[in-house]
Image (cartoon, rainbow, N blue to C red):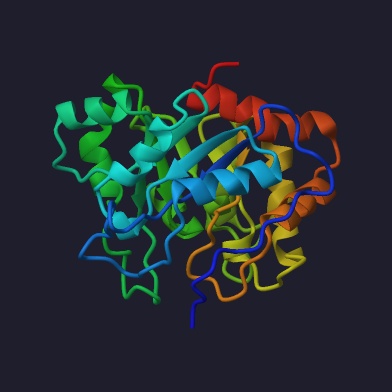
Amino acid sequence: MMTTHLPTVTPPRRPLPPGACDAHAHVFGPYARFPLGEVRSYTPPEATADDHQAMLDVLGFQRAVIVQPTAYGDDNRCIMDAVARDPERRRAIGVATGEASADRLAALAAGGVAGLRFVELISQRYAGRPKGSSGFADLERLAPAMRAYGIHAQLFAKTETYAEWMPRLLALDLPLVLDHMAAAGAPTVAADDPLFDAVLGPLREGRIWVKLAVIRHSANPPLYADARPFHDAFMAANGDRLLWGTDWPLVNMENRPDPGRLIDLFDAWTPDETARRKVFVDNPLALYGFTA
């Protein structure tokens, strides 16, 4: 049974560089003001913008990207309110259905929405795609308007789905961000699997971005050793197109890790200071348009 308290957060052993960005987190509530969608696959505890800011302060992040959770559907008010509190240092990843108008996308962009999220993950947990999500077919319909307003696409799918869809996705001529390490992880996909190369190839060419987040696709917490080959493969492919996120508040996890320890793990796997600065500072600065 899921706990209702927020995960423990303690500082990383090695301070983050100035301007570091947590490129993937969520906010929920207060529910009296921002109720969840009636059609949803899960009901998380509240994790408000104030809670989120407290987490960032403990870890040392100065910038943040707040991702719309599927439990809110395409009601983006909660994330846009969080961004409005500090618009110079916050960006949002929203959700829109394929029927959304160009005016709606323009309003989202004006409110700090840098990207839209599309989910093509078929999960036994949700008996299909998570309720409240938009899929890749919605992305294809929205792509022209997204290009017009400078909105990128953030994607969540399994590696084999990316292998199938990648030619069509690349043809959209949009920045593409694959979250949760492109769902690459043992035992489903090996680091030397041709399916995985369908992601590595475009990454090497600088045609996609990948968010490094090991926790959803590892069977070996808290060291996540089975995720290390994928992390190393991404770093070797193109360190200029990688981002990192806490995934706070780590919903739908029974044993939620301390994000400070996840930063420590990244540091252990990525000891080079230049590579570290790219992932935490330079790359999000380039993608999300923060002021330097």
The quadrant where residue 271 appears: top right
Q: Residue 222: x, y in percent?
A: 74, 68
- Relative to 109, is 51 on the left or the right? right
**Residue 85 sits above or below residue 121 on the image:** above
**Residue 83 sits above or below residue 32 on the image:** above
Residue 62 seen in the current view: yes
Residue occupying image coordinates x 16% and y 26%: 103
- Relative to 50, is 214 on the left or the right? right
Q: Residue 8: x, y in percent?
A: 66, 62
Residue occupying image coordinates x 29% and y 55%: 72
| Quadrant (top left/top right/bottom left/bottom right) for the C terminus | top right
The quadrant where residue 221 appears: bottom right
Residue occupying image coordinates x 50% and y 38%: 65
Could you tell me how many numbered marks the image carries? 0
The quadrant where residue 20 appears: top right
Residue occupying image coordinates x 46% and y 42%: 66
Name of the residue lying farthest toward the bottom: 1
**Residue 57 sits above or below residue 109 on the image:** below
- Relative to 112, is 108 on the left or the right? left
Q: Residue 220: x, y in percent?
A: 71, 72
Residue 179 seen in the current view: no
Q: Residue 145: x, y in percent?
A: 23, 27
Nearest the eye: 242 or 73 = 73
